[in-house]
Amino acid sequence: MAKTIVITGANRGIGLAMASIFSKRGDSVYAVCRQSSRELDALGVNVVSGVDVTDESGLAVMAQSLAEQTIDVLVCNAGILRDENLSNFNLATMRDQFEVNTLAPLRVVHALQAQLSAGSKVAMITSRMGSIEDNTSGGRFGYRMSKAALNIASVSLSHDLAEQEIAVGIYHPGYVQTDMVGGRGDISAAEAAGRIIGLVDELTLATSGQFRHSNGQRLPW
Ligand code: NDP
């Protein structure tokens, strides 16, 4: 049966690729973005534009556009990557990453709570760079901290939403060829998106709150 899917940051990169795959398999996709793109327009999905996920009025536009929907899968994908270290110490970019990567996904779930119900799934797109155990190269303060904080917030959500039978998946997409990494990366956005969708399909309350690589591997916190 066709499902209702909501994806943030759906105008490009991994979000766009997920919108494309869900749409091709017949699901009803709501692509949330600040501004649409030619590629997103070409998919013919429902575009919810004007939504900056860090902005209360944008979140209100999103909630209003989706007020009549019951969401089967909510993908919190929008994210930013900046670079700081001790010699390039930038509090502003660290704060920006907390706003977009940590607080915004929580705010999106909060804003759309009434549209989630038993059987709904939330997919948090995080990063292995938020893994404390996996941090062997240092730096990237803001990105690492913001994704580690997203991870623990997502585990809290998995507990908080379990009573309503809503499962939460926490996914590292892999090193993916998108604008975020200047087109470098090991896999295409389409491949990462396909893998994440496969994991979302398999997600249950029993596996809620797990941190996984898109290749299925459990990742250390
Ligand atoms: P892109 O830079 O290609 O896309 C980022 C998306 O996030 C864009 O749609 C962008 O919209 C949106 N976005 C950023 N800030 C905001 C905001 N304030 N409000 C609304 N939308 C916003 O990156 P990817 O597709 O690679 O990244 C998707 C997710 O995957 C991110 O969470 C990222 O951290 C994660 N990830 C990516 C990896 C990779 O190798 N690419 C590795 C690990 C994790 P706009 O066009 O308006 O800027």
Image (tube, rainbow, N blue to C red):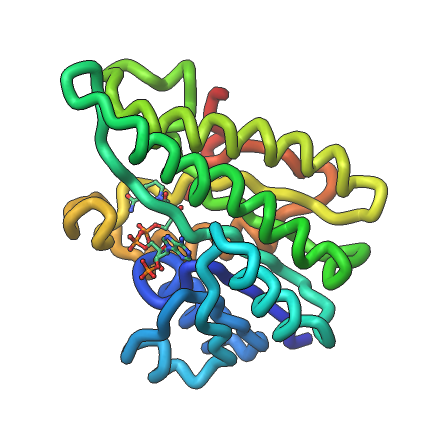
Residue 30: x %, y % from top left: 54, 72
Left or right relative to 27: residue 161: right
Residue 42: x %, y % from top left: 34, 84
Q: Residue at x 61, y 64 (%)?
A: 60
Q: Is residue 6 visible?
A: yes
Q: Residue at x 69, y 45 (%)?
A: 167
Taking depth in this image into account, of 140 and 176 the one nearest to the observer is 140
Q: Is residue 215 visible?
A: no
Residue 45: x %, y % from top left: 48, 80
Assign the N terminus to one quadrant of the image.
bottom right
Residue 200: x %, y % from top left: 57, 52
Q: Residue at x 42, y 52 (%)?
A: 78
Give the vertical position of 164 relative to 130 (above or below): below
The tally of labels here is 0
Q: Residue at x 48, y 70 (%)?
A: 31
Left or right relative to 10: residue 186: left
Taking depth in this image into account, of 189 and 44 the one nearest to the observer is 44
- Give the farthest residue toward the right: 163
Give the vertical position of 160 relative to 31 (above or below): above
